[in-house]
Image (tube, coloured by chain):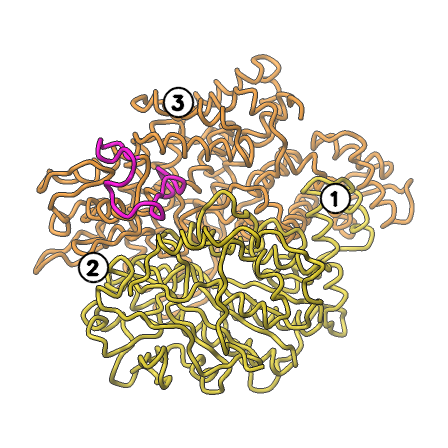
Amino acid sequence: MLFNRRQFLSSVAAATLPQFSVNWARANAPVDRSLVVVFLRGGMDVLNLLAPVDDKAYVSSRPLELRVKPTGDDRGLSLGSVAGGTELLLNPAAKPLHQLWTKKQLALIPAAGLNNATRSHFQAMDLMERGVSTDAFSLPRDGWLTRLVTGLGKTAPGSTLCLGGAMPQSLSLCETALPISDVWDVDWMPSANFREALMHMHAGDSSLDRASKQAIEATGFLAGKLERDTNRQPTLKDLPKGIAYPDHDFGNKLRFLAEMMRVNSDIHLATADLDGWDMHDNQASQFAPLAATMASSLLAFHDHLDAIGRPTTIVVMSEFGRRVKANESGGTDHGHGGLMMVMGDQVNGGQSFGHWPGLATEQLDEGMDLAVTTDFRDVLSSILVQHGAGASIASVFPQHETKLIKGLFRV
Amino acid sequence: MAVSSDVNLVARAGIRAGSADRERLGKDGWAGWVAAQLQMPTGDSPAVSAAIAKAVLPIQYEAGDGYVARKEDRAFILLRKPLNELWHLVDWDTKMAWEERIRPASELLAATVLRATLSDAQLRETVTDFWRDHFAVNRDAVEDVAVALPTYDQDVLRIHAFGNFREMLEAVATSTAMLAYLNNASSKASPANENYARELLELHTLGAPAYLNATFDRWREVPGALEGKPQGYIDQDVYEAARAFTGWTYGGGQYVSDGVALPKTGEFTYTEQWHDPYQKRVLGVEFDPHTAPMADGRKVLDLVAFHPATAHYVCWRLCRRFVADAPPADLVKSAAQIFADSAGAKDQLARVMEHILLSPEFAMADARLQRPLFLFASLQRSAGVVLPPSQENVWMLNGMGQSLYGWPSPAGHPLATAYWQSPGLLVRRWRGMGDIWTRIMAREPDKDWANIPGFAQHWAKAMGLDDRHAVSSAELLAKEYGETERRISFVENERWTTAQALTVLSASPSYQTV
């Protein structure tokens, strides 16, 4: 049966009310595990990464260069049986993901996403990062991670990081998150007297004063933990053997994050973005390099955290997948169903979860896009349970009837 | 909340009052200042022209395949060249360094900093900056955008900043920068490339609040659609609008048919062979098949430019930028009324801006953080110094959160204060100010100050701050030096410390917010 959006919305609306407030005192004790949320901005074309290569609808919708290839030197990598019997092959540009899959450290949730008809980047990101699926006035405006952080009381300086100068919407209105990109964003204070004078300038309680104090205190706290060379300059510890990040901004940021997580065990949450997936045009020359950067960065990051003994769950998401049928510009337009990936030491990897809806026209959302069969919040809720934050789910994802994904984690 | 002084209103709307502004304010008051700003010519003022004429912007690169290494100071020679004279820079058969290819963008960005610092037409600088985000293009997306930036900034945004919205919209739709960035240049029948059409509706005109796709599946369900006046739009409108713009492209040597290719000029051209000629329906209005060249696209531009949701959305954004994060509803409404009533006027946008700036809501608004470009300009204006153009200036602004023509999505920089004052960007702001003051101090002539409070008071006054703000920086210096009655002279090893003191002084919320 084809999923009907309107029915879904009305069923959710009917099943809402009592979840909205939550007694935080009942929330589980703080957890040691860290969560890293990676957002692929622009709408990652899942069908160019992971696809049923022999599906007739797939073959007829796209030129070969926008498909995962069935044959030849650069044919798709086999993942075994994926998505309830449908075999999906992985784009070889993302070979590092295959390694994680083979070692059972990566779980795939194809056809996951947002149950809303929007095909707007900004609305889809806004809804997903607020942890909601409609624009209803009654729903909260802050980010889902903001509610998670404040609900758990994990507000110590420097315990929530965003990689990049700006705050993602998932942490909007969070006053304790710190956006940083490199050691110089942390180790910047010219002198103790400067710090004191700057604090004095921001002695008030305006939002600017509060943000300033948070910046000064959180970076100061983290700076005290940085590894330093003989000249007292901040430095990153050498990478463990066998781990190599690609020379790319995204890889550099993840490496920096892993280092911060090594020196500061309080970091329980971090976000990182990889831009550039909005490929309306000339996709053939753009997709493989970006997929390779994404995959090799994630592999290095995963193995790095493993090597330094930092228990972490990494979840990767995007605002939507892209249109099944390519356009005449050699690209793809905004679609619907996407892909979520979960990796980490406790993940029941080497498996996919959720139902593959198929690519025949009548199986598609609005006759043109991969349908959503797993609500993104169900994946995130399953992670929260694993992190001992199951009691937070009702307030982090209000007005959503959670269906936990069975078996996503091993233990 | 209090009514701000005229000097503060200038800082909120424009940059910071220089001495000429203070003189005019004394004579004509705030309303006179606004009227004068709206009348200023669209070209560079003599001070800006003179500075650009004698400025140099260094260029440096290593040798590569087919070109030698270069390191030189080079004048701004591409800024005023027509696009067809720059287009050889994206000829991939000619080998050259990437720095040469994107040099038009480098010159434009450096000139933008100079203009903000020196221009008397401050309001045109800040309003043009608004349109840079409203009609955002990203110079890093593809080199074609970088090469087209000078004409985009001058001939599309700056020239229409106080003009007519419908005219600006068509200038944007036919601009090489936008055609390249949102890919309409490669959009052909069929399926068309939806990128531009979608952002036209969502970002440039009706706006996200009018996107009703989650509520309605079919165009005729949208209230008002059957009368040709739908309240908003859905994806079906996006698909149809995308068809209307097929064939709007620019000459980049593209293959059209056997023996026919588009010229390599970089200039707009309509390519009939790529156009989807059949009947369409956009926003409840029928389009006949086989209309005249560009008629379909122009009809879409008419429909969106004159839609009531556009008047509201554009004015809401202007009020959000210039008045408050949550703009007063009455002000947005009255501005939208003027926007709609003057839709045919040459000075439509000037009328809207005048209404917003002279409103009591503007005068009563809470001060918010100044954007990095205008903070940088303000610091130079306060110090009476113009720092030489450099790539580093632009990188510093990127670090502080303002990436001129470099925001990674077509939404442009967020308007909300929460973005600009995230703790991460505040750290970058303080680091950037430390760098700016260090460079300003390096240019200060040697001078002895009798004591530290005297030094701090002098600079507080230059920044328009009162004495109490000087205390923090004076105390910082006193502690660093271990004494108060110390003479300060600008010898090498003291410039850095004094720059830190001035960074603290200018970090005062009174200076940072306008």
Which residue is labeled 3 in the image? B337
The chain containing the residue under callout 2 comes to A
Tell me the residue at 59%/60% (across/down). Answer: A162
Q: CA distance from mark 2 to mark 1?
A: 55 Å
Q: Which residues are magenta?
A: B202-230
Chain represented in orange: B
**Dot 3 falls on which chain?**
B
Image spot of residue B505 (x, y percent): 74, 40
Report the amino acid beneath label 3.
Answer: Gln
Residue in the foreground of this view, choosing between A216 and A317: A317
Does the stretch in magenta take in A100?
no
Residue bearing mark 1: B504
Q: What number is the disc on residue A365? A: none
Residue placed at 17% from the left, 45% from the top? B270
- Of circles 2 and 1, the one toward us is 2
Q: Position of residue A313 (x, y in %)?
A: 57, 73
Question: For the residues carrying marks 2 and 3, which lies nearer the camera in this image?
Answer: 3
Q: In the rendered view, does A3 fall on the left or right side of B428?
A: left
Q: CA distance from mark 2 to mark 3?
A: 40 Å
From what the image shows, is residue A229 above or below residue B414?
below
Give a yes or no on whether discs 2 and 1 share a subunit: no
Q: Residues within 10 Å of mark 2 (few under 14, many from 20)?
A: some
